[in-house]
Amino acid sequence: MMEGTRDSVDAGDPGTGAPGPAGPGTGRAAELKALGRRYALLPLRLFLGVTFCYAGLDKLADSHYLAARTDPQSFYAQTLAAKPHSPVGALLEPALHAPTFFALLIAFGELAVGLGTLVGLWGRLAALGGATLSLTLFLTVSWNVSPYYLGNDLPYLMAWTALLLAGTPYLSVDGYLARRAERDRARGLTEDAVRRRTFLDGSIAAVALGGAGLLVGSLTATFVRKKPGPAAAATPAPAQSGGTGGSGGAKVSVAAADVPVGGSAAVKDPASGDTVYILQPKAGQYCGLSSVCTHAGCTVDPPRNGALSCPCHGSKFDAATGAVLTGPAVKPLPKYTVTKDGDRLDLGAQSS
């Protein structure tokens, strides 16, 4: 087991390098420093473990994740949308031929990585699995995020790299097995016997933990996941007389001067509370587009160079029509009518 390096207890004389006298509390301070170094990665480990457990269970509970290929939010549809824009697009072909298998592999893989990291069992192997998953997501769904630091999968990859280098030697099953191995060596067991015992007990723990993860994941997929119901038809709210917009509620408008060609102004849809961009893609042509990305519900950025970009996974939408330019989103942004009334632009009803 990797132990933390010991701190120098005393500061020492700056001229000679000789150790100086120990002052009150010096030993305690050294102990706290050593303790801090020892558990420095524990918060990161807990965060990654909980997050990947949650991510795996969330996928298994999602009614769309394992849905038919026609569902635009299914694993198949998302993979198909990411393929043309990914540098490893050709490697995604097997996932398109067996989408259910690969979807379950990713979900249960995230759950296994999360559990292994939390309990500290084969920590470096779990970190390698987490890094592999994060790298895969970075090269597919997050590849088009610009600038790169707005994507979330690359930071996860760097975080997993830290655990891959350090392992999980403290407050962990790995740490317990390493300490027991040291005791076995001290009482005269051969190195081969120590290694066999450590590997066998680690394997038993891994099988038990894997079985627990498989059981929890299967129960989640069976009893928590709901089948996607038929899409409800949108019923436009009735317009009210005397200054109300077609989207229902109070009238929403902005000054036409606030929406330059190629630019936008943000308003709120009074019916849903969502932000809507009122745009002028061409001179005299006005439209409204929802700011809610149809992939994962993130807020897309205002238009730039004729496109609205999602900072979460890199989807891009046409600023004139809302159509998808770059996946992983597969559905266009909902569109609103916009009418010009003098020097004002009025937000109307959602038209798509």
Image (cartoon, rainbow, N blue to C red):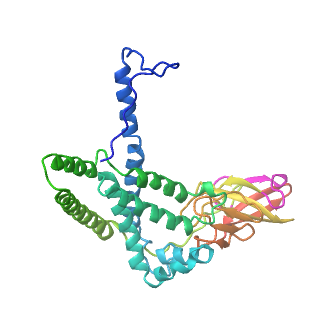
The range drawn in magenta is 246-263
- Of all residues, the one furthest to the front in this rendering is 16
Residue at 42% from the left image edge and 20% from the top image edge: 19
Q: Pinpoint residue 329: horizontal percent, then vertical percent.
A: 58, 70
Q: Pinpoint residue 285: horizontal percent, then vertical percent.
A: 82, 67
Q: Is residue 253 visible?
A: yes
In the foreground, 281 or 151:
151
Judge whether residue 112 is colored magenta: no
Q: Quadrant of residue 10?
A: top left
Residue at 61% from the left image edge and 77% from the top image edge: 84
Q: Pinpoint residue 312: horizontal percent, then vertical percent.
A: 58, 59
Prevalent SS, magenta region: loop
- In the picture provided, is 272 more to the left or to the right than 10? right
- In the picture provided, is 14 more to the left or to the right than 199? right
- Residue 231 lies, with reference to residue 302, above or below; the image says below
In the foreground, 60 or 181:
181
- In the picture provided, is 218 more to the left or to the right than 91? left
Q: Pinpoint residue 334: horizontal percent, then vertical percent.
A: 64, 67
Q: Quadrant of the C terminus?
A: bottom right
In the foreground, 63 or 186:
186
In the foreground, 197 or 114:
197
Judge whether residue 255 is colored magenta: yes
- In the picture provided, is 263 more to the left or to the right than 151? right
Residue at 52% from the left image edge and 75% from the top image edge: 79
Total number of numbered labels?
Answer: 0
- Residue 170 lies, with reference to residue 189, above or below; the image says above
Q: Is residue 227 visible?
A: no
